[in-house]
Amino acid sequence: MNNVQNLSASREDRARLPMPGKIAGLAFRYVIAIVLVLFAVIPALWVVSASLNPAKSLIGGTFFPRNPGIINYQELLSNPFFPYATWFLNSLKIASITTVLTVFLTCLSGYTLSRFRFAGRRGLMMTILILNVFPSILAMVAIFSMLQQIGLYISWLGLDTHAALIFIYVTGSMGINVLLVKAYVDSIPLELDESALVDGATHWQTFRHIILPIMTPIVITVGVLTFIAAYGDFVIARVLLRSSENLTVMVGLQLFQTDRFDQDFGMITAGAVLAAIPIILIYIPLQRYVIDGLTAGAVKG
């Protein structure tokens, strides 16, 4: 009896041992993961190193520059030809206002499409879905002409104004974000709304005090994605903004590609590092909520 038990135990032990195929597959996955991590990390480290390199080069002293310092940052912030600090603040202002407006409007719209039934609801959702199929760059000529005409009557909403840029960003980001919010609200039990209405709450009170706190992951998701998109946009800002004091940081960095500064990689990389700080500070602490917000609406109930 003991021999049979020992034989059975030895067979189970051998079954639990990793097979050569499993080991090879695991090793292959680790190699791929390491390659992807290095592919993502090395360029970032290279840029940071170049920004600390007083030689203003992308080649010399790649990761360990000689006599590293912040001279590139000092020259960047004190350069009279390029008001980098102004561009940086412009980007933060535009992205922040865009985020607040987008979150507010998409939460209301998504809740409305999820909880209310009205004429044209299905057609409206289908229209939103179809419009998101086409890239926004296709509308650039129409947007430019429209803002040019609006500026003749409303100066603060025409070309070369932050209000116009914010308006374009908000309207452009509404589509997909509304569908994301609607999918998330669909996963919230309808019984919560019904219980609140039975207790005498209005639809606004139900949304504000019951549904909105549950929507925290998708609210943060929409906010983070909107901020990153508005802050990092280059094409639309480059087309609509003209004067130097109104430029965003992404457009301003492109101006370094001139005869005077096209070889000053120290200032260019220093500007890139500073421009990346807000994205890092926002995304890293909130990435868990972003993942929850993007996946929670996939399952109803």
Image (cartoon, grey):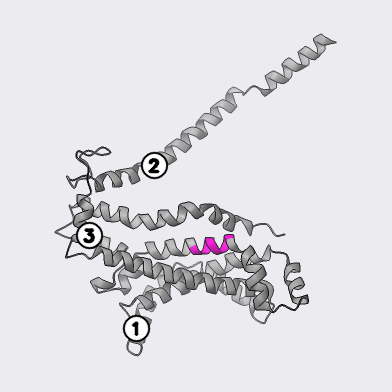
Place residue 119 in its image quadrant: bottom right
Q: Quadrant of the C terminus?
A: bottom right
Which SS class for mark 1?
helix
Q: Are marks 2 and 3 in contact (CB under 8 Å)?
A: no
Q: Which residue does the numbered mark 2 point to in the structure image? A: 39
Q: Amino acid at mark 1?
A: Trp
**Part of the protein shown in magenta:** 217-223
Q: Is residue 194 left or right of residue 140?
A: right
Which SS class for mark 3?
helix
Furthest residue to the bottom?
153
Furthest residue to the right?
1
Q: Is residue 237 left or right of residue 297?
A: left
Disc with the residue nearer the chain's start (2 vs 1): 2
Disc 1 crowd, CA 10 A, few/some/many (<14, 14-19, 20+):
some
Disc with the residue nearer the chain's start (2 vs 3): 2
Q: Amino acid at mark 3?
A: Leu
Is 204 situated above or below 216? below
Q: Which mark is residue 77?
A: 3
Disc 2 crowd, CA 10 A, few/some/many (<14, 14-19, 20+):
few
Is 300 situated above or below 96? above
Q: Are marks 1 and 3 in contact (CB under 8 Å)?
A: no
Furthest residue to the left?
260
- x, y (%) of residue 253? 26, 60
Q: Which mark is residue 274?
A: none
Residue drawn 46% across and 55% down?
A: 283
Is 6 situated above or below 246? above
Q: Which residue does the numbered mark 1 point to in the structure image? A: 156
Which SS class for mark 2?
helix
Is 175 situated above or below 119? above
